[in-house]
């Protein structure tokens, strides 16, 4: 058990390190650099001083080592684009993405799991309806759902069509800010959640249908346990294994999906920041975003592993995989 | 259900192949009087039923993008003229079945031509991903030992990366402005690099278990070398699995192209693909007034739904891939 998690932890560390280093070197070796932001008429001295500020005058390897040494002390350098420390920018953006992702994951769970139990354990119009709805949703990736929702919101004006806060609600009070964010959140969160909810529903339905085939269900039925209780208490707990397994994978889906949703719905998260940093080749911002993304991924995977281990003793016993 | 899915996919493929004949207008022709024009409605009733006809749309206000139909003069559609299924004469049109975009180009025509680019790219990338995945997975499963360990770790590593970010980073590292042909090759390569682990993981498992079978021992006894064994005998046994994976990758790649082009890192705007068309829909205030700009989103939905329906109950649940 301990060895298993030690290996997973090591994998997580390697992941963060490799991803951020690769991002740094990729940006450095790509043609052009961030000083292009100064425009074509910038004085050569100005360009040179900007390059020096970002350590672009050193060799890529030296810059990488320097960055690593600083990152070890939680100093991720400055963003040229924003002229602010990368740590500050990334922390805020990552927080926004985390809010979006956590709410979306919760919504997907709250929608997908109960519906999956119903459609997997019953037949009839309700189950068919759920199955059809989930097939539609699974064919509507975040790009399509977010475009659709933004369109609906823009036409009906039921919800704000994009952004995370509105200018009117900037009076500096916490409660106003929270209410404002809560108003902006449902659209992107639901756009992100729907396809994942559909995936959860399908998995849960399959898994509970399989569990209901098991002999212990027949035994419980023979003992006179009512059908509802068999499904909820007995079959469901057995069917949880595959679901817990998918949480570890869902985190990658969430991050990828949230990039798209953030872009379409103008949510100021890590995806947008990464995109801006990449396009401008703002080297330390790119590396910082990659490190944060890698960290979120690693944390999500660890939580997924824990869930899986909690649900399935065989995982705990397995010699790391 | 399965038949409906196959029908949808076939329909899209046929439409893509027949684009030059089916589209009423060339995809890059710009109608100066029809910027953001709404879809031209084809009427079949005029008092009583009659052959399909349209009313010419006249631009009333360029600022408000207001159009009015000239109902005094019905324009009959021309069938099988000038190498097109249906069209109208130049001075009586344009016939814009799904409206026009910001440059007055026929969205319907661009949608058909876009299907060609989007589908071809997805198919090429899928084959490439399968080739790489089958090779790496096959070697890992067949060789075992340290090679297996290394390749499996690599597979696992690439598998957990959020694909959209990696695609974005790889694309952004390359020059932003490139000719369409180069973009095509580059995107296919990036997608293949991201898609192969899904194939490799399963192929490795299948090959590793097949390797223990008697026919492999017999093959070895008859003098078959490792490469021959792997390529001629072991990899063919994974074909069913690989086919299922292909149906996962294909929609994911269509979507990846759309996303990259949507954010401006895919094809240039001059090439009609579903992604470059969606780019115009990025403007929120605009799509409220011109919802037909979302037509490519509907097209993507149809393809993904078609693939999902077609493979339902064939060894996989319609689970969406993260790309």
Image (cartoon, coloured by chain):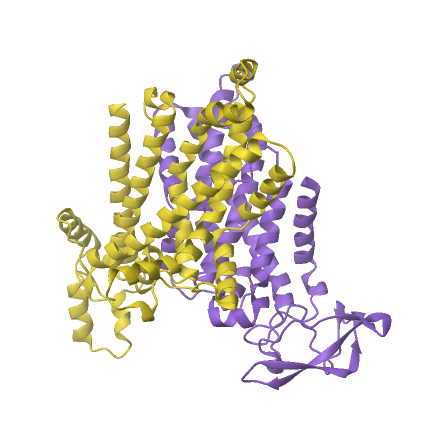
Chain colours: A yellow, B purple
Kindly indicate the quadrant of the structure image that contains residue A210.
Answer: top right
- Which of the two residues, A184 or B127, is positioned nearer the viewer here? A184
The quarter in which the C terminus of chain A is drawn is top left
| Viewer-proximal residue among B110 and A225 | A225
**In the figure, is residue A69 to the left or right of B280?**
left
Q: Position of residue B148 (x, y in %)?
A: 38, 27
Of B241 and B94, the residue lying toward us: B94
* Residue pictured at 41% horizontal, 48% vertical: A104
Q: Nearer the viewer, residue A194 or A80?
A: A194
- Looking at the picture, does residue B229 appear above or below residue B81? above
Tell me if residue B191 comes above or below residue B241 in the rendering: below
Q: Residue at image x 42%, y 25%?
A: B143
- In the image, residue A280 lies at what x, y percent? 31, 65
Asked if residue B226 shows in the view, the reply is no
Spot occupied by residue B99 in the image (x, y as percentages of width and height): 63, 71
Q: How many marks?
A: 0
A124 on left or right of B130 = right
Position of A189 compared to B60: left or right? left
Please name the residue shown 23% across and 66% down the image.
A172
From this viewpoint, is residue B126 visible? yes
Residue in view at x 84 percent, y 70 percent: B51
Where is the N terminus of chain A found, in terms of image quarters? top left
Which corner quadrant of the image does residue A78 belong to? bottom left
């Amino acid at each position: 058990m301990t060895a298993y998690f030690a290996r997973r932890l090591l994998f997580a560390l390697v992941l963060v390190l490799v991803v951020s280093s690769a991002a740094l070197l990729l940006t450095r070796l790509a043609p052009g650099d961030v000083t292009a932001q100064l425009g074509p008429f910038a004085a050569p001295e100005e360009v040179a001083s900007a390059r020096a500020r970002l350590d672009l005058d050193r060799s890529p390897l030296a810059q990488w080592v320097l960055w690593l040494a600083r990152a070890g002390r939680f100093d991720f350098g400055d963003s040229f684009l924003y002229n602010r420390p990368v740590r500050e920018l990334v922390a805020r953006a990552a927080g926004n993405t985390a809010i979006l992702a956590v709410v979306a994951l919760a919504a997907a769970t709250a929608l997908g799991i109960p519906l999956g139990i119903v459609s997997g354990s019953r037949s009839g119009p309700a189950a068919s309806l759920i199955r059809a709805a989930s097939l539609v949703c699974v064919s509507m990736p975040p790009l399509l759902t977010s475009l659709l929702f933004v369109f609906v919101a823009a036409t009906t004006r039921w919800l704000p069509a994009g952004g995370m806060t509105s200018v009117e609600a900037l009076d500096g009070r916490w409660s106003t800010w929270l209410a404002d964010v809560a108003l902006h959140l449902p659209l992107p969160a639901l756009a992100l959640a729907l396809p994942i909810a559909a995936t959860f529903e399908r998995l849960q339905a399959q898994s509970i249908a399989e569990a209901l085939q098991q002999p212990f269900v027949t035994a419980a039925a023979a003992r006179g346990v009512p059908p509802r209780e068999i499904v909820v208490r007995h079959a469901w707990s057995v069917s949880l294994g595959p679901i817990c397994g998918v949480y570890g994978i869902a985190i990658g889906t969430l991050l990828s999906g949230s990039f798209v949703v953030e872009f379409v719905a103008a949510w100021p998260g890590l995806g947008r920041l990464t995109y801006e940093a990449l396009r401008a080749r703002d080297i330390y911002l790119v590396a910082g975003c990659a490190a944060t993304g890698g960290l979120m991924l690693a944390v999500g995977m660890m939580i997924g592993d824990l869930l899986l281990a909690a649900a399935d003793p065989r995982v705990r016993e397995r010699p790391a995989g | 259900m399965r038949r409906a899915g196959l029908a949808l996919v076939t329909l899209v493929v046929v439409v893509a192949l027949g684009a030059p004949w089916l589209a009423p207008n060339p995809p890059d022709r710009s109608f100066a009087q029809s910027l953001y024009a709404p879809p031209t409605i084809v009427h079949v009733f005029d008092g009583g039923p009659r052959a399909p006809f349209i009313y010419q749309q006249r631009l009333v206000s360029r600022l408000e993008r207001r159009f009015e139909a000239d109902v005094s003069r019905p324009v009959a559609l021309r069938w099988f003229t000038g190498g097109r299924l249906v069209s109208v004469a130049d001075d009586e049109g344009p016939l814009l079945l799904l409206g026009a975009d910001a440059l007055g180009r026929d969205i319907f025509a661009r949608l058909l031509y876009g299907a060609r680019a989007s589908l071809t790219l997805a198919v090429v990338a899928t084959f490439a991903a399968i080739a790489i995945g089958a090779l790496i997975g096959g070697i890992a499963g067949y060789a075992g030992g340290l090679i297996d360990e290394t390749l499996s770790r690599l597979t696992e590593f690439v598998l957990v990366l959020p694909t959209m970010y990696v695609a974005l980073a790889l694309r952004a590292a390359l020059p932003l402005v490139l000719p369409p042909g180069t973009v095509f090759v580059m995107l296919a390569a990036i997608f293949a690099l991201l898609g192969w682990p899904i194939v490799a993981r399963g192929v490795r498992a299948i090959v590793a278990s097949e390797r223990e079978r008697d026919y492999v021992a017999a093959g070895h006894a008859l003098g078959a070398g490792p490469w021959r064994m792997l390529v001629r005998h072991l990899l063919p046994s994974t074909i069913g699995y690989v086919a299922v994976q292909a149906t996962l990758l294909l929609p994911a790649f269509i979507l990846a192209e759309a996303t990259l082009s949507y954010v401006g890192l895919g094809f240039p705007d001059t090439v009609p693909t579903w992604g470059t068309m969606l780019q115009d829909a990025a403007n929120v205030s605009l799509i409220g007034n011109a919802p037909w700009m979302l037509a490519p989103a509907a097209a993507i939905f149809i393809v993904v739904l078609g693939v999902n329906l077609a493979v339902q109950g064939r060894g996989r649940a319609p689970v969406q891939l993260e790309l």
